[in-house]
Image: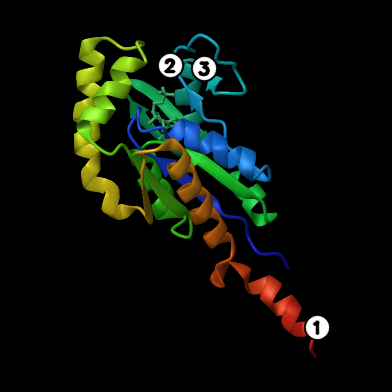
Amino acid sequence: MKDKGLLLVVSGPSGAGKGTICNALREKFPNIHYSISMTTRQSRTGEVDGTDYYFTTNRHFEELLQEDAFLEHAKVYDHYYGTPKKSVFAHIDEGNHVMLEIDIQGAMQVKKKYPQGVFIYVVPPSKAVLEERLRGRKTDSEEVIAGRLSKARQELDWIQQYDYVIVNDDLHEATARAEAIVLAEMCSVDRNGCRIQQIQNMYQ
Ligand code: 5GP
């Protein structure tokens, strides 16, 4: 018997820095499997199909929905996003850790199905900082930025549903906190029942 791997679910408004934190976690823990989402939005410059996302059409996405192919899915900014079911639980059952970087709607669906997951919310230290980061990216119009700020405000009401919050005031610190959370969860007694049993058996 093997202990199950962790299911790490990371959410936060765009501009919170969750992508950077997730990348740092992947570097620090190369054995974390990063789930690649499927989306119907256009790929951005530099994004690679099958690496950043699986890019697809509305029609194909809706077909897959009918086939119950997603662990969770949501419409974010008018586009579909979903986590393909395939492989998430296979990895966890094998004792491998899996990380999902998904929005709140999706995270709440996962929480219902798998409350043992570790739910982490990354939040910018202030509205002003978020605004500054969104403008600094120079990728979005004023209208889009306003929409993202308003969404960020609404989403704050959901933080209580998460297990951990990381206030990203300093990227280095925020990454260290994320690593600490993952390490602590990896060491939890509840999550190491089989390992503990094996060690106990050695004394019999
Ligand atoms: P972006 O288009 O900027 O890459 O992502 C927009 C939002 O969609 C982000 O909050 C991101 O976390 C979320 N997202 C990405 N993949 C998924 C997914 O598979 N499911 C859900 N529910 N949200 C996702």
Q: Residue at position x 59%, y 16% from top?
A: 48
Measured along the vertical axis of the image, is residue 190 above or below residue 45? below
Q: Residue at position x 43%, y 28% from top?
A: 81
Residue type for callout 3? Thr
Mark 3 residue CB less than 8 A from any atom of ligand 1:
no
Q: Quadrant of ligand 1?
A: top left
Q: For the residues carrying marks 3 and 1, which lies nearer the camera in this image?
A: 1
Structural distance between the alpha carbons of marks 1 and 2: 54 Å
Mark 2 residue CB less than 8 A from any atom of ligand 1:
yes
Q: Residue at position x 43%, y 16% from top?
A: 41
Residue type for callout 1? Met
Residue 23, quarter of the rendered image = top right
Q: Would you name the residue on which mark 3 appears? A: 56
Dot 1 or dot 2, earlier in sequence: 2
Q: Would you name the residue on which mark 2 appears? A: 41
Q: Residue at position x 56%, y 23% from top?
A: 52
Dot 3 or dot 1, earlier in sequence: 3
User: Circle 2 sits in a helix, a strand or a loop, which is it?
Assistant: loop
Question: Image check: 92 left or right of 15?
Answer: right
Bin the neighbour count of mark 2 within 10 Å (Cα to Cα): few under 14, some 14-19, many 20 and up: some
